[in-house]
Image (spheres, grey):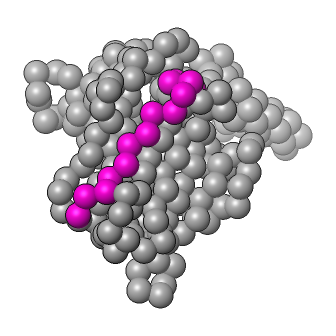
Amino acid sequence: MRKILALSAAIASVFAVTAAHADILLIDDFNFPVVAAVVVADQSAGNGITWQTAPATTALPAPNLASTRRIGVESILDNSGGIGGIAGNVGGPLGRLNFTVDTADNGNGYVEWVIPSFAITTPASYFFSVIASSLGSIGFSSVPNLIDFHFNGLSDGNAANDFDTAQASIGAFGFNPAGNPVNFNLSDAEALKLSGGGTLTMKVSGGQGWNLRLDQFAINLPEPTSLALVGLALLGAGVVSRRRKA
């Protein structure tokens, strides 16, 4: 029994080390351009997405994995009738992505990245920090901010390389410079498709008057060394079990 308890404690400590030493692979730290690129949708609802212009995309330097990024906004409810129904901006020395919606309006925000092929380990997840989040409403009821992802793989337009990540809710957060970490888990099959490279699109939506501010967007990966330690711990558990049966 003592051996089993000691081994259980060892396995638990290994999993704790694994969680503490996961690698973060940056897709976009939102530091570029240093002067923020701003996109504003002031057209009537239903006119489609207004994408970043001049330049149409932002080239991202190392250590960012994505080679380019562009942002877009889409008006779906226009009660203000003026400029600024929904706006998105990214960049600056603090590295932030911001979407703001006028109180009387509603709309969707988009970020699109082009990602080259890269090595990946599993399990993996999308990872970012919420700096601030205020909820909008439908009628008089508050609704959460919603984020979902679509990936379009590079392989000859083969739809088999595309996938959508389940929509997740982002609740209300007061301003927190350190950020509130959020993970979107990827299946092994999705992680493999992502590693082949392609176009990744994030869509943000909510109720009337929602706002969201995010810090860096990344892929959360387990550290290979930690995975090896977990394997050794589980192998040891098997050896003890076989000895007990013998």
Q: How many marks?
A: 0
Snapshot quadrant of residue 246? top right
Residue 222 counted in the magenta span: no
Could you say which is closer to the camera, residue 136 or residue 181? 136
User: Residue 162's x, y, as percent?
Assistant: 22, 36
Image quarter of the N terminus: top right
Q: Can residue 234 be seen in this view?
A: no
User: Residue 155's x, y, as percent?
Assistant: 16, 21
Could you say which is closer to the camera, residue 41 or residue 202? 41
Q: Is residue 184 visible?
A: yes
The reply, left or right, for residue 63 in relation to residue 45 is right
Q: Which residue reaches farthest right?
A: 2
The reply, left or right, for residue 103 in relation to residue 233 is left
The residue segment tinted magenta is 29-44
Residue 47, compared with residue 51, is above or below; it is below
The reply, left or right, for residue 23 in relation to residue 142 is right
Could you tell me which residue is drawn at 50 percent across and 19 percent down? 64
Q: Which residue reaches farthest front?
A: 82
User: Residue 177's x, y, as percent?
Assistant: 74, 45
Could you say which is closer to the camera, residue 195 or residue 52? 52
Could you say which is closer to the camera, residue 17 or residue 184? 184
Snapshot quadrant of residue 238? top right
The reply, left or right, for residue 201 in relation to residue 103 is left
User: Residue 203's x, y, as percent?
Assistant: 36, 50
